[in-house]
């Protein structure tokens, strides 16, 4: 069984600050990890993914994430947030299966203050 | 222009009725999915289709029936609607269900069952 845990339900930062959103997963086999962003009332937008190779992956809008097998983590970071980064961020995991179901975490709401 | 079109954006239904949620994608993708997001549960995977064939079904209830009349269509028929079915239903697609594929999501259909 795959599970995803996002320990922070809500994070508040000031514009220009850095932010790190935590994601931990549990699964023993080959996995696929991704992050999505959801602005209020909108659909999910893909940010970045990891399957293999360099554990640090770059995404859109200055986001990056680092995979750690030893910590079972895939934390998302941004060096300098903008007000438009205010949204809910979802971490997702899936194994290679025919159906490719993504298992999502509960999400972290990021509020960026001016 | 949106590449994954979901119709309608909002839908109100009465308990016991039947509704069809429409999804069309213009990305040339071969895999399509349905996810559900409600206030009580995190984003949850429902179905995946590949080349118009059902690959995975994580929905316990047979009241939910995907329908794929064309390669780029995956509609969702819901019968005998219940208030607990109230949620936002997201359609997604990817080139294939294989590794290194990040599903792209539509804007969702927000269903309210009274």
Image (tube, coloured by chain):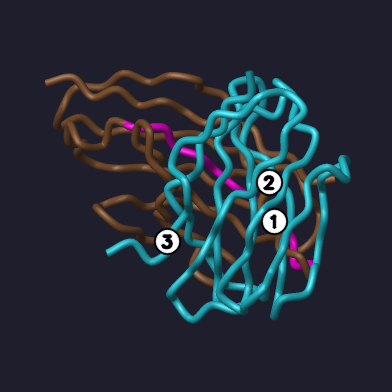
Chain colours: A brown, B cyan
Q: Residue at x 38, y 40 (%)?
A: A42
Question: Alpha carbon of mark 3 to alpha carbon of mark 1: how far?
Answer: 17 Å
Local SS, label 1: strand
In the image, the segment drawn in magenta is A87-97
Q: Quadrant of residue B75?
A: bottom right
Q: Main secondary structure of the magenta part?
A: strand
Say which quarter of the image contains residue B22: bottom right
The tag on residue A57 is 3
Between marks 1 and 2, how big is the CA–CA gap?
Answer: 6 Å
Q: Secondary structure at mark 2?
A: strand
- Residue at 81% across / 61% down in the picture? B56
Left or right placement of residue B98 versus residue B112 in this view: right
Q: Earlier in the sequence, mark 3 or mark 2?
A: 3
Q: Which residue is mark 2?
A: A103
Residue annotated with mark 1: A94
On the image, the x and y values in percent for residue B94 come to 55, 70
How far apart marks 3 and 2 lie (CA) works out to: 20 Å
Classify mark 2: residues with Cα within 10 Å, few (<14), some (14-19) or many (20+): many
- Tell me whether the residue at label 1 lies in contact with that at label 2, contact meaning CB atoms closer than 8 angstroms: yes
With respect to residue A106, does B65 lie above or below? Answer: below
Q: Indicate the chain on which mark 3 is placed.
A: A
């Amino acid at each position: 069984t795959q599970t995803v845990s996002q320990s922070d339900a809500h994070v508040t930062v000031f514009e220009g600050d850095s932010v790190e959103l935590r994601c931990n997963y549990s699964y023993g086999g080959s996995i696929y990890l991704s992050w999505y962003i959801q602005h209020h009332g909108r659909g999910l937008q893909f940010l970045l993914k990891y399957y293999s190779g360099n554990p640090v992956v770059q995404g859109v809008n200055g986001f990056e994430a680092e995979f750690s097998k030893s910590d079972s983590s895939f934390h998302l970071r941004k060096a300098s947030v903008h007000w438009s980064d205010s949204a809910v961020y979802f971490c997702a995991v899936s194994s290679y299966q025919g159906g490719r179901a993504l298992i999502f975490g509960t999400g972290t709401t990021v509020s960026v203050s001016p | 222009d949106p590449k994954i079109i979901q119709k309608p954006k909002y839908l109100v239904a009465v308990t016991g009725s039947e509704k069809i949620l429409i999804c069309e994608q213009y990305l040339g993708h071969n895999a399509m999915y349905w996810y559900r997001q409600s206030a009580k549960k995190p984003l949850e995977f429902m179905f995946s289709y590949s080349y118009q064939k059902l690959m995975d079904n994580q929905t316990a209830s047979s009241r939910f029936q995907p329908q794929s009349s064309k390669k780029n269509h995956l509609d969702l028929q819901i019968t005998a609607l219940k208030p607990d079915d109230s949620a936002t239903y997201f359609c997604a697609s990817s080139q294939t269900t294989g590794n290194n594929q990040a599903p792209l999501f539509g804007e969702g259909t927000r269903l309210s069952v009274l």
